Image (spheres, rainbow, N blue to C red):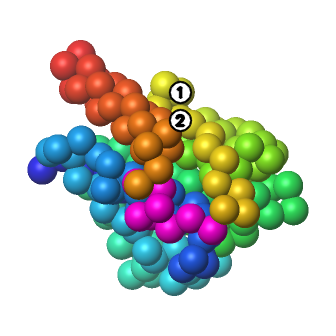
Amino acid sequence: MPHLLTLCGSLRQGSTNRALLQALAHLAPAGLPVLHYEGIGELPLFNPDLSDTPPAAVRDLHAAVAAADGLLIACPEYARGIPGAFKNALDWLVASEQFPGKPVALFNASPRASEAQAALRLVLLTMSARIVESASVTVNLLSKGMTAADIVAEPGLAEVLRCALGHFQHDLKEARES
């Protein structure tokens, strides 16, 4: 069954970015399940010497990304860049044969996190991700302490996110048909 996979750039359980991705799972169109990858904090530091025989956590990441029809990414900004643990996960995916061309939607929980979004976009494009611009959105959740349930219950936010997911689903359908 087709599904989307979320990748959260924050390791914090109470992260706004995590809440945003969890809300997306509740708002996804029928027939398009959203699964959450939770292993980023378990990945060892990237070491290209291990590429031929990657550790189990890396194999799990590769398998999860390969099985997904598309990726939904939300990432905070730390020191004007991508958090180290998330960049480490992306480094492990650089040599993945399944990553190039993978559809990606970027979700930004803070309009002030523009530097990280630009850096993330650059890294993903370098990795040959296919960023679906019409499905990539910025919402203002900064300092609001919203849970996934709060986001789903907020009509304006929920509509923006449903619309983004609809664009992503449409893009996936068009890609399959071409």
Q: Residue 124, relative to residue 82: is it above or below?
A: above
Residue 72, compared with residue 23, is above or below; it is above
- Left or right of residue 123: residue 170: left
Q: Is residue 67 visible?
A: yes
Q: Position of residue 115 (x, y in %)?
A: 81, 45
Callout 2 crowding tier (Cα within 10 Å): few <14, some 14–19, many ≥20: many
Nearest to the observer: residue 63 or residue 169: 169
Look at label 2 and name its amino acid.
Answer: Ser
Relative side of 100 to 88, left or right: left
Which residue is labeled 1 in the image?
Answer: 133
Helix, strand or loop at mark 2: loop
Residue 100 appears in view: no
Q: Which residue is mark 2?
A: 136
Q: Which residues are magenta?
A: 145-152
Q: How many marks?
A: 2
Q: Position of residue 100 (x, y in %)?
A: 45, 40
| Residue occupying the point 85% across, 55% down | 80
Tell me where residue 158 appears, x and y as whole percent: 43, 44
Picture quadrant where residue 138 is located: top right
Question: Is 34 situated left or right of 12 in this image?
Answer: left
- Name the quarter where the C terminus is drawn: top left
x and y percent of residue 146 in the render?
A: 56, 65
Q: Identify the main secondary structure in magenta.
A: helix
Q: Nearer the viewer, residue 121 or 88?
A: 121
Q: Which mark is residue 102?
A: none
Q: Is residue 126 above or below residue 60?
A: above
Residue at 29% x, 25% y is: 170
**Does the CB distance between marks 1 and 2 fall below 8 Å?**
yes
Rendered residue at 56%/54% (across/down): 74
